Amino acid sequence: MPVSSQAASLPGLSAARDGTLLLNGVPYRGVGVNYTDAFLRPLRHPEDESYRDDFRKLGANHIPFARITACGFSASDYQLYLQDKEKYFKLLDGVVQAAEESNVGLIADLFWSNTAVPDLVGEPRDQWGNSQSKTRQFMRTYIREVVSRYVNSPAIWGWEFANEYNLSLDSPDASRNLPPVNPRLGRTRSRGPDDALTTEIFTSALSDFARTVREIDGHRMLLTGNNIPRFSAYHMQTGSRGPDNMEQWATMLLRQNPGPFNPVCIHTSPISPLPHFAKRYNELIQTCAGAARSASKSLYIEEFVNCPPKTECSIATRRQIVNEVLAAIQANNVSLASVWVYGRKMVHDPNSVSFDDNTAPVLQMIGDFNQKWSPR
C-alpha cells in the first residue's frame, strides 16, 4: 500500500480509505490491554502514580497500547474538573506523559459511563440526543479541552466516545432497567421515562462527537466503544422481540459503528454467549470481521475477558481462553484486540492481570503473540 509522507508523520492510529489501520503510515495490528485504573486511580488518589511503573512494564513486555478512561466514571469524579481544571489536567498529563516515555499508545475514552455527564448537569439520559442540551454542551467542551491538549502527543492512538452505550438502546423494558440513584456517585436525580436511550439518540451524539473531534484532530481513529449488539437489536428498533438473523445482526453492528467510526468495536470472548447463528467463537469473529470489511473498516475486539465468572481462574483456564481469542484474531486478520483488564485495584475483578502476580503468563502470551503477529 503506498504511503504518503504526510501519513507517515501523523501521530497515532489512522484509517486508510480501505479501512486498514495505519501507524506511522504503515499497516498496523496488535493486542493490548484495557487499563481503566490508569487515570481513575490518580483522579481519586492523586498521590498514586503507580501507572508509571505499569506503563514501563507494558512497554518492556511488548504490550503496545492501553485503552484508558480519560474521564471520570461517575458524576462525582468530575468535581475536581469543575473546581480546579489545572489540577485535573495535571493528573491526566502525568498519565499521558508516562505512556509517552514507555512508548505505549493510548486509546482515550472520553465519556465512559452514559449516566455521568447527564447526572453532572442535572438532565435525563435522553439529552444525549439533544444538540442544545447541557449534556451535549458539556460533551463538546470536554472534547475540545482534552483533544486540543493532547493532539500532538505520540501516545494518543485514538479517541473513543464511550463504553457499551449500545447495550442500553431501544430496550422494550427500559423502564425496568434504569440506572440506580446513588448520591455517593453523584446520581441524585430520580430516574424516569426520559432516561431511556434509543439508536437515534446514540447516533446523534456520536455524530456530534466525531464532528467536534475532527475540528481539532483530522486523522486519528474514532471509536464508539461498543459491545456487540444485543442478539435482538434489529427487532428491538421496531419494538418487537425475537432473535435477529445473521444479516439483521450484522446490519446493527454497522449501524452502531457508523460513518467515520473505524474500527468497528466489539466486546466478546470465548466464554461470552453467542448469537444463534454462530456455533463457535471463531464464527462470531468471522461474521464481525466480514461485516466490517463490507463497510471498508477494520475490527477491534476491544474487550475480551480471560476468566469465567464465579469460577476458580487457574492459569490453565486463562491460557485456554486467551489462546482461542488469539487464534481467532489470526484466522480473521483482526487489526486490534485488548484483554480485560490490566492492573485493576480499586474494585475486585477476577479478570485483572498483572506482571506482579500469578497472572503474568497471560500478559507474556500476548507479548509473545505481538512479537510474531504485529508488523511493528
Image: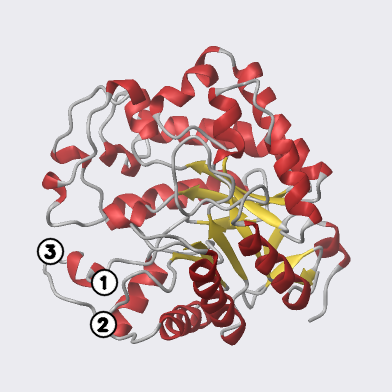
Based on the displayed image, in which of its 4 quarters is residue 348 positioned?
top left
Q: Nearer the viewer, residue 60 or 254?
A: 60
Q: Tell me: residue 49, above or below residue 303.
A: above
Disc number for residue 197: none
The local secondary structure at tag 2 comes to loop
Mark 3 is on which residue type? Gly
The reply to whether callout 1 and callout 2 are in contact (CB within 8 Å) is: yes
Look at label 2 and name its amino acid. His
Task: Tell whether 9 sits left or right of 44.
Answer: right
Q: Name the residue under label 3.
A: 239
Q: Does any portion of residue 194 appear in the rendered image?
A: yes
Instruction: Name the residue carrying label 2.
Output: 276
The answer for how far apart the CA atoms under marks 1 and 3 are is: 14 Å
Looking at the picture, how far across and down is residue 209, in whole percent? 49, 46
- Residue 326 lies, with reference to residue 122, above or below; the image says below
Which residue is depicted at the point 31% across and 84% down? 246
Q: Measuring from the top left, give residue 291's x and y in whole percent.
A: 45, 80
